[in-house]
Amino acid sequence: MSFQRVRRTKLMRQVEDKFQRPLETLVPELVNQHGLSHAADELGVSPATLGYWMLKMGIRYRRVALTADETIEVKRPG
C-alpha cells in the first residue's frame, strides 16, 4: 500500500503515538467499523478534524444505503 506523503501536525503525531499505527491505516479501519463521528471520538478529535485529515491524506469516504437483500464489495487495487 502506498501512502500519500502528508506533513503531520502535532495532534496527528500524538494520535499515531497513542495507537502505535499510521493514520493512513488506522482511520479507514475505525471509520469502516464505527462511522465517522464515533471514529473521531475514539481518536479524540472532532468529526471536522477527522474529515480534514482524511481529505489531506487522500482517504475517500462514501456512504451507501442498501436494502436488506443487497450487499456491497470493496476492492483494493493490487
Image: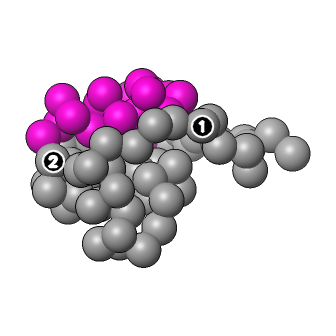
Q: Residues within 10 Å of mark 1 (few under 14, many from 20)?
A: few
When the figure is inspected, residue 30 is found, relative to residue 47, above or below; the finding is: below
**Dot 1 corresponds to which residue?**
5
On the question of residue 20 being in view, the answer is yes
Q: How is the image coloured?
A: one colour
For residue 74, side relative to residue 33 (left or right): right
Name the amino acid type tagged 2. Val
Q: Residues within 10 Å of mark 2 (few under 14, many from 20)?
A: some
Badge 2 vs badge 1, beta-carbon distance below 8 Å: no
Which mark sits nearer the N-terminus, 2 or 1? Answer: 1
Q: Position of residue 16 (x, y in %)?
A: 37, 62
When the figure is inspected, residue 6 is found, relative to residue 42, above or below; the finding is: above
Name the amino acid type tagged 1. Arg
* Viewer-closest of 74 and 14: 14
Within the magenta stretch, is there residue 15?
no
Which residue: 31% across, 42% down?
9
Q: Closer to the observer: label 2 or label 1?
A: 1
Q: Position of residue 67 (x, y in %)?
A: 42, 34
Within the magenta stretch, is there residue 65?
yes
* Viewer-closest of 16 and 25: 16
On the question of residue 34 being in view, the answer is no
* Viewer-closest of 6 and 45: 6
**Dot 2 corresponds to which residue?**
45
Q: CA distance from mark 2 to mark 1?
A: 21 Å
Which residue: 31% across, 28% down?
52
The residues colored magenta run 46-68
For residue 2, side relative to residue 52 (left or right): right
When the figure is inspected, residue 8 is found, relative to residue 56, above or below; the finding is: below
Mark 2 residue element: loop
Q: Position of residue 39 (x, y in %)?
A: 25, 52
Which mark is on residue 64?
Answer: none
Which residue: 51% across, 36% down?
6
